Image (cartoon, rainbow, N blue to C red):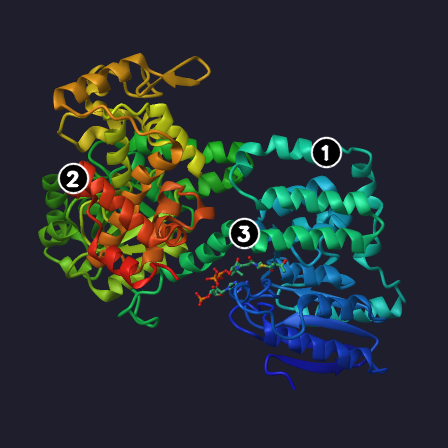
Amino acid sequence: MSSVATFEVEGSIGIITVDSPPVNALGINVRRALDEGFKRFSSDAAVEAVVLVCDGRTFFAGADISEFDKPQEGPDLQAVFDLIEGGSKPVVAAIHGTALGGGYELALICHYRIAVPSAKVGLPEVNLGLLPGAGGTQRLPRIVGVPAALDIITGGKPIAANAALELGMIDALAAEGKLREDAIAFARQIVAENRPLLRVRDRNEKLEAAKGDPDLFDAYLAKNARAFKGFKAPGNIVRAVQAAVETAPDFDAGMARETELFIELRDSAESAAQRYYFFAERETAKIPGIAKDTPLLPVKSVGVVGAGTMGGGIAMNFLNIGVPVSLVEMSQEALDRGIGVIRKTYEAAAAKGRMSPDQVEKRLGLITPCIGLETLGEVDLIVEAVFEQMSVKQDIFAKLGAIARPGAILATNTSFLDVNKIAEASGRPEHVVGLHFFAPANVMRLLEVVRGTRTDLSVIATAMKLAKQIGKVPVLSGVCDGFIANRAMRARGDQADQLVLEGTPLEAVDQAACGYGFAMGPFQMMDLVGLDVIGRDSTEQTVMSELVARDRLGLKRNGGYYDYDDKRQGSPSPVAREVIAGLAEARGVPQIPTEGSEEILARLLYPVVNEGARILEEGIAVRASDIDVALITGYNWPVYTGGPMFWADTIGLPKIVAKLKEYEGRFGESFKPAALLEKLAAEGGSFTR
Ligand code: T1G
């Protein structure tokens, strides 16, 4: 008797029910249970067909990702698959929840697939730097055809049951809540009709069209070169699907090629980083000292103070999940403008088919436009998103402290001001928390939850949970200038400025950053965001402030670090070069350009690791992997490096310490290695292993 499965017979239908929380991952115990169950029913003459179903939240959600770094144990997935595919009885996969990766590949091995309408199926291995290594690249094109299979597998996104039915990824829909009985009825019907034992591997007709188009795969890679840049998995996926086409009808030959390409990815640094990131992203919600059952405060209505770019984006997060928002501005004109921007954003999404016109109206209908704060007396959560000035925020929080209902959560979206000072102004600091959204607030996944010294645990627990409900990745931060993401990445920005003042061409700095995997370099990013936006809070004289003074705001006006042609193509600007040289001379900066991308990267990124170590040792971040999650979700740090702290471990901490000490000798103590970094390096320790 298995500990994770039950085996029953109803009439002539054998039923294998697996229950292995949290997601029925195909770990060793599940594989053993499947091995036992299929052996039992294949030798039971009374059983004419088998239904495979799961209890809990979902059908099998894939291989057990935590097993990849351990020695393989017990029957492997292929052995279980061979039992099913080599059997003489039809097997029906009964799908609910999210049948993903190896879970959906297991469903593809079964002869038939039935799902409830709320179910989703997919092959998301690409998000782990992998490819579907249990036949997914060989079977899916045989069902949906090559073009759709390429998109589904390189995209890695789940497919809703209705769309899956249309594509042929499932064969039937069950009634919601009646999966087991409908699957058994479906199995009985298959037996009664004596349907053929159709194996997906024997279906080759859908591959024919691609056989006649040998350039299809190279063309697909060329078309997606930008999206796939830096990632290994998409290329291997395309080659595995190509093998399916080129070796058909010899399925085993295609499988052999898939296995080769899978092992190459499984053993790659990129996949190790992306598997690390998968768990790191889920770890952020676990806060030492805050029990899982900490009572949560209700958040059924929200007030957003400020309908500007940030306030409007923040409001949309709540509108998107059906929570009514009282949107506050100080004038009708500002309010109308803010709501107009929200409407435009939704209408643009509707124009792309991402939402229906009536969803647009429904969400806009959840907005209560308000002039002044007085109307916020009943809401459960108030998020302030006004001008980044302490006195303005303190004034607002003093008023909110008097207006908001008892127990309401008061949140500030400040990106660097002291949350404790804002909290004190409210008169109820235990209910004040920072909710630091990243622009665009309705798009970026990172949400820094900033705990004040006196913030109540239930307020923190509620904010962390709420973040996930609005589709964000919450990272808890203590109070400091810049919290986690901005503070760590400022270290890169400072070095970029210093490098160009020393005579290193700015385009060399950007190229090094892009070569590492950033979508754009620091100067390209500043030009894109707008130099007036980025530099608005600084008072010192910098290259940026000098460019702004010349009305050079970046891409949006007159260029910035780069000049732009009418196709928005940038070329290094002589004006920027002149400003840099002038400032360098005025400051007496020795002109020693840094040569080569590796050295430029060490200058740019080792200080980020060092700042991360300081953020850790000051207790601002709960754990090193939270810093990685913050920079990956907040700054698009390339996920296949694992983030700065994981990457530092792969580089080797002693090497980083030695380099920082060299820089300290040349450029001063800003490069002094953090005590924690030195300690770990000396002890052979690591941040994330
Ligand atoms: N392996 C191990 N643990 C997993 C897991 C998995 N596949 N999926 C989830 N967990 C854990 C997760 O760490 C968390 O643990 C808990 O389950 C709840 O997850 C051979 C090689 C299924 C959509 O990529 O997308 O099959 O934090 O918080 O928001 O070709 O989990 O509670 O301790 O995400 O409801 C392919 C990955 C694997 C699916 C549910 N499969 N999982 O989301 O819960 S590789 C995947 C998900 C593979 C084959 C290849 C999501 C979910 P803890 P959660 P959720």
Q: Quadrant of the N terminus?
A: bottom right
Cβ atoms under marks 3 and 2 closer than 8 Å: no
Front tag of 3 and 2: 2
Q: Earlier in the sequence, mark 1 or mark 2?
A: 1
Q: Amino acid at mark 2?
A: Gly
Viewer-proximal residue among 322 and 250:
250
How far apart marks 1 and 2 lie (CA) works out to 55 Å
Residue at label 3?
A: 268
Q: Left or right? Give the position of 292 relative to 147.
A: left
* In this rendering, position of residue 391 left or right of residue 354: left
Q: Residue at x 74, y 54 (%)?
A: 256
The tally of labels here is 3
The tag earlier along the polypeptide, 3 or 2, is: 3
User: Label 2 belongs to which residue?
Assistant: 668
Q: Which residue is label 1 attached to?
A: 216
Q: In the image shown, does 285 or 462 lie closer to the viewer? A: 285
Left or right, 653 with respect to 252, comes to left
Q: Residue at x 21, y 31 (%)?
A: 331
Q: Secondary structure at mark 3?
A: loop
The C terminus lies in quadrant: bottom left
Q: Amino acid at mark 1?
A: Leu
